[in-house]
Amino acid sequence: MGRLLASEVQQLLHNKFVVILGDSVQRAVYKDLVLLLQKDCLLTPSQLKAKGELTFEQDKLVKGGQLGPLHNGTNYREVRQFSSDHHLVRFYFLTRVYSKYLEAILEELQSGEHAPDLIIMNSCLWDVSRYGPHSWNSYLQNLENLFGRLGEVLPESCLLVWNTAMPVGKKITARFLPRKPLPWAIPLRRIVVHANFYSSIKASNHGFDVLDLHFHFRHAWNCLQSDGVHWNEHAHRQLSYLLLTHVAEAWGVELPCRPPAPIGELIQDAPERQPQANRDQLDLSLSPPLPSPRRRPLLQTPRPRLRPLLPPPVPPHHMSPPSRHYPQDCYFSSDHVFQSDQFYFQSDVPSSTQPGFAFEADFNFCSPPPMASFSPCYQQRAPVVYRGFSRYLVQGPYMPWRGQHRRSKRGASAHPESRRQ
């Protein structure tokens, strides 16, 4: 993972329709992406704090927000959209992962002029805290309903990335959470870990991508705001780099080679004006990240995927059993399932014999799962500036969504379907 410039993000998302769904943290994901599509600077604290404003960096408020009453109820709505000649980004505020409102959003996307190329989504904190004592069981059922429904209605060319919920602090003062204690004794930060596990499994089982933001930011406590839920501008820019790198990997796109920006540097450079109460009780040290696998550059026309060259043969008497690397903080891939270094299930959690949960009996994830190592002999060409493919020649910059598509096991296309006028 390396730093990206606004011009490179524009090229990666050229003629793409991006939809972001979720709570206020996902709204900040939308804002940072909109900003990064236009200029190389960070969000300001006031931009991160603003809610439902009429305009933000050339975008517009479509529904809800300041067009109606601002409140913290579960029926709060906010729809934002940024559009340019070759980019379209839309945000929907969610207070529940699956509901009649979510169905209305899907119907709106289906009947709209453009089909989504990329959907980024998460919903967790509202689900497990604002819907009564049965909110946990409802959340699990809604996750199953959500991914099943998305598998039915989304085009096969659409890449959906499920973001796991970000870590939360021990002391939480965010206004949207109920003032009275939750109906269970487990702290909210542990409930988030459990919710991330189940949501990642369900998303993966339906063939969708998972980006484990909880794992990547589990030590970045001094980037957490004082309310224990939201994150500062440095964390959100790093989040954007992680997300765009994941999308590029899923599309088979090679990003420019630059020195990586590990989260460890982010923690050291983060300002001290936003400390978190329990920061001194946590270990802020991070292991150095492994270099990301290199991908082919974008070209005018699709080219076959390059494969890493095999190392030279080793004489039999020098051969040794193959070994695997165990990457730490920068590991993620399109088939990535949930990781956490603080994961343990009580006895009331379903056992490994339950269908769909074929894991170790104690459910103890103390370190990330192994990942196959990449050969150092991988052949690399110089980066080529992306100008878009001429695969689809249509009147407008986007391709209309024509009817429903059949449900199938999803896999990222080696060549993203980019379109030009």
Image (cartoon, rainbow, N blue to C red):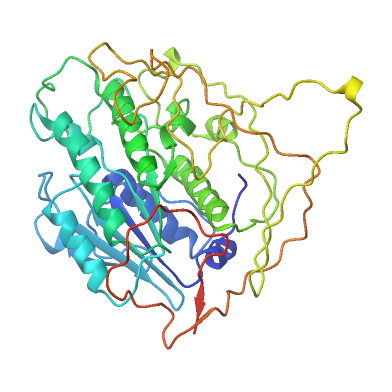
Q: Judge from the rendering whether residue 134 lies leftward or rightward of residue 155; answer left or right.
A: left
In the rendered structure, the answer to whether residue 7 lies left or right of residue 183 reads: right
Above or below, comparing residue 376 to residue 415 in the picture: above
Measured as percent of width and height from the top left, residue 252 is found at: 59, 57
Q: Is residue 410 left or right of residue 330?
A: left
With respect to residue 92, does 321 lie above or below?
A: above
In this view, the residue in front, 188 or 345, is 345
Question: Residue 397, how many percent across, how many down?
Answer: 44, 80
Q: Which residue is farthest bottom?
A: 395
- Quarter placement of the N terminus: top right
Given the current orientation, which residue lies at the most extreme front position? Answer: 316
Q: Does residue 375 show up?
A: yes
Residue 18: x %, y % from top left: 39, 62
Q: Is residue 203 above or below residue 55?
A: above
How many labels, in total? 0
Q: Residue at x 83, y 39 (%)?
A: 311
Q: Quadrant of residue 373?
A: top right
Lateral position of residue 16 relative to residue 205, left or right: right
Q: Is residue 230 visible?
A: no
At horizontal 19% and vertical 42% (from top left) the residue drawn is 142
Q: Is residue 99 above or below residue 200?
A: below
Q: Residue at x 65, y 57 (%)?
A: 254
Q: Residue at x 18, y 44 (%)?
A: 96
Indicate the position of residue 398 as horizontal and vertical percent values: 41, 77
